[in-house]
């Protein structure tokens, strides 16, 4: 739970900041900025975040219904 919370906080903060910069044109969504955005998500731990969420879902009573 602690790891998930830390990842979620870091990812949400970065996504919020980057979203604003993409919207205002400070970052180019059609260029290298998009690739750097994705690289930074991976560096922060988006893959681990998805893994934790997936494992929690599969352990839940809703999985397989």
Image (cartoon, grey):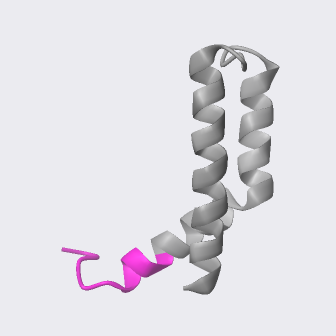
Q: Position of residue 49 (x, y in %)?
A: 60, 66
Q: Tell whether position 4 is magenta.
A: no
Q: Is residue 57 left or right of residue 52?
A: left
**In percent of the image, x 57 and y 42: which residue is there?**
16
Question: Which span is picked out in magenta?
Answer: 55-65
Q: Position of residue 7 (x, y in %)?
A: 64, 67
**In percent of the image, x 54 and y 85: which residue is there?**
1
Instruction: Please identify the quarter of the rendering in which residue 39 is found.
Output: top right
Q: Is residue 55 left or right of residue 38?
A: left
The one of 49 and 8 positioned closer to us in this rendering: 8
Q: Position of residue 63 (x, y in %)?
A: 28, 76
Q: Position of residue 44 (x, y in %)?
A: 75, 58
From this view, report whether residue 4 is shown above or below residue 42: below
The one of 43 and 17 positioned closer to us in this rendering: 17
From this view, report whether residue 17 is shown above or below residue 57: above
**In percent of the image, x 67 and y 60: which residue is there?**
10
């Amino acid at each position: 739970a602690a790891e998930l919370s830390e990842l979620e906080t870091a990812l949400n903060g970065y996504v919020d900041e980057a979203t604003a910069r993409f919207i205002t044109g400070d970052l180019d969504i059609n260029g290298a900025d998009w690739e750097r955005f994705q690289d930074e998500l991976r560096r922060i731990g988006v893959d681990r975040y998805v893994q934790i969420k997936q494992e929690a879902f599969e352990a839940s009573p809703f999985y397989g219904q």
